[in-house]
Image: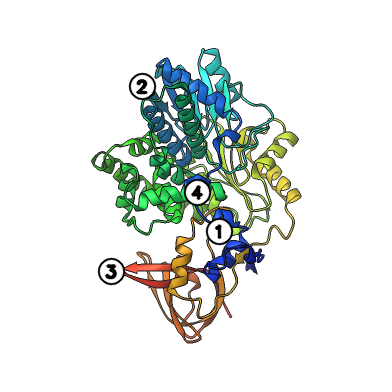
Amino acid sequence: MNTAPRIQARAAGQPELLPAELHPVLRRVYAARGVAAAELTLELKNLLPPDGLLGLERAAALLADAIAEQRQVVIAGDYDADGATGTALAVLGLRALGASRVDYVVPDRFRMGYGLSPALVDLAVERGAQLLVTVDNGIASLSGVAHAKALGLGVIVTDHHLPGAELPAADAIVNPNQPGCGFASKALAGVGVMFYLLMALRAELRRRGQLASEPNLANWLDLVALGTVADVARLDANNRVLVEQGLRRLRSGRGRPGLLALLEAAGRPLAALSATDLGFVLGPRLNAAGRLDDMRAGIECLLADSLEAARPLAQELDRLNRERRALTSQMSEEAQLLVEDDGAVGLCAFDESWHEGVVGLVAARLKESRHRPAIAFARAQEAGVLKGSARSIPGLHIRDVLAAVDAAHPGLIERFGGHAMAAGLSLSEARYPEFAAAFDQACRERLSPAELERVIETDGALSTTELCLATAQVLEQAGPWGAGFPEPQFFGSFRVATLRLMGSEQQHVRYRLDCDTLQLEAVDFGGAERALAPGAWLQAVYQLGVNRWNGSELLQLRLIHLEPI
C-alpha cells in the first residue's frame, strides 16, 4: 500500500559563502546543494584535468601507436544512450585525430547481452579488428577480454561501472571507479570517459608531432551531454560543465545533425533546450533503438553528417519510441497488479509475455510508485533463462545487494553487474521464486523504516514577490539540473479557482490557482485521478516553469505532488 510522502525542506547550507549579487532564491537553492563559488562558472576551463585518470596515458599511447601504424580500431559499444553517444564520439574523434581505419560493433541485447562478450569479440574480428576499444562496458567482461587477447587483439577498456573483485586482463583500463584511480569525479558517464581519452590522445599526438590538424573536441560536447544525462549520471561540478557546454551547442543550432533531427521530429525548439529535454526527449528516442530493435540505427543517426541524411533515421527512432511508450505503459500496468498485494520490501515482477528491452523502464516505474527497490524480468532468447533489470531507492546500493545474494546463494544468479541505482542480471527461470525471496530478504536486512518512507525534499516556500516569471527564468538558466543536482521545487498552499482536463486521454489537469493576491497557471501531468474541484484548498510541491506560447513567456507551476487541505 502507498502512504503519503513526507515533505521536508533541504538543509540550508551556507548561502553567505556565495556572491551576494546572485538572485536570492538561486542563492539559497545553490547553497542547499553545496555549490561552491568556484563552481558557478560552467566554462570548459573549469573541467578537471585529464591526467588524474588512471590508465589514461597508457590508453592514449596505444591509440597513438595504432594511428601511426594504420591499424584497424574497432569500438565495442553498448545498446543504451550512453553507449551509443560514446561509440559515436569515439568514431568521430578518432577519425578527426587521424585514424584512417575505425569501425564499431554493438551487441544485440537479445542474443549477446550486455558488455564485451566473446561473441561480440568475434564480430569485431570479422570487421578486421586489431585494437579493440570498449565504451561504457568492459570492466566486468573478463571472458570477453580474455578471448580478445587469445586472438591477438590489443584491448583498451573504457568504462565507468563498478568493477568486480577481478579486473579484465586488458592492455589499458580507463575507469574512474577502478581501484587506485585518483580522479576527483567518480560520476563520469561512459561517454565522459571517452571524451577524456580523446583529450589525452590529442595531447599525446601533439607531443609526438603526429597531429596533422587540431580538432576542437568541444564540437562533440552535445553527445557527451546527452549520454551523461540519459545515463542519469550524477551532475557534480565536472559533469555540469560538460552538460551545459553541450546544451549551449544545441541551443545555438551547432549540434550534431542527428540530434537536431531528433529534436525536430519531437517538435522541440532549440532556444530553451534544457537537460530535461536530453533526459526525456532525446534519450528515450535514442534508447528505443536498443530496446526494441538494433542500436546501430541510433548510432548511425548520431554519425550522420547532414540533416538530410539524419532525418529518415530520426523518424524511425521516433516511431520506435512511440511503440516503446505503448509497450511500457501496458507492461507497467501489469507489473503494478502483480505486486499490488505483495508485502515485499524488494519487489520482483515477471510475466512470460514481457519484452526484454523494456523491463528496465518497468522496474523504474515500480520503484517510483512503490518507493521500493524493484526488478522486472522477461524471458531471454536463451531457453529457460530470465533477464532482469533492477532499480533502487536512495539508501540501497543495488549492485551490492545482488553481490550479497550471489554470495549467500552461489549459482543462483548466473550473471550480474551495474552500479548503485541500477543493475542487470540473468538467472534460471526455474529458480525465479527462490531469487525473489532472497532478494526481498537482502533488501529487508539493509533498509530501515525511515529509508522505506518516501520523502519529497523542497527548497521551502516562496513569497508572493518571489513567485513570479523572473524567478522562473533565473532558475531555468541556472542549471543544468538533474541527478544529484535536483531541479528546485517549492512548497505552498493554494485555492483552486478553475480546472480543465487536457491531453489525448484527458489525463492531465490545467489549474488556475489563487495564492493571496496572485492567480497562477499550474499543470499536473497525469493528475486527472487526483484532480480537485474549484473552491478546494490544496498544498503542493511544485517547480517553476516558463510556458512559451506565440512568442510570449508566462509563469507556470508544474505540480509534483498535491494533497487536499
N-term mark: 4 or 1:
4
N-term mark: 4 or 2:
2
Relative image position of residue 303 (x, y in whole percent): 34, 35
Mark on residue 241?
4
The crowding category of the residue bearing disc 4, from other C-alpha atoms within 10 Å (few below 14, some 14 to 19, many at least 20), is many
Measured Cα–Cα span from mark 1 to mark 2: 42 Å
N-term mark: 3 or 1:
1
The crowding category of the residue bearing disc 3, from other C-alpha atoms within 10 Å (few below 14, some 14 to 19, many at least 20), is few
Does residue 305 appear to the left or right of 153 in the view shown? Answer: left
N-term mark: 3 or 4:
4
Closest to the camera, between mark 4 and mark 1, is 4
N-term mark: 3 or 2:
2
The crowding category of the residue bearing disc 1, from other C-alpha atoms within 10 Å (few below 14, some 14 to 19, many at least 20), is some
Measured Cα–Cα span from mark 4 to mark 1: 16 Å
Residue at image mark 3: 550
Q: Residue at x 36, y 50 (%)?
A: 250
Quarter of the view holding residue 30? bottom right
Measured Cα–Cα span from mark 3 to mark 2: 48 Å
Q: What amino acid type is highlighted by mark number 2?
A: Ser
Quarter of the view holding residue 499? bottom left
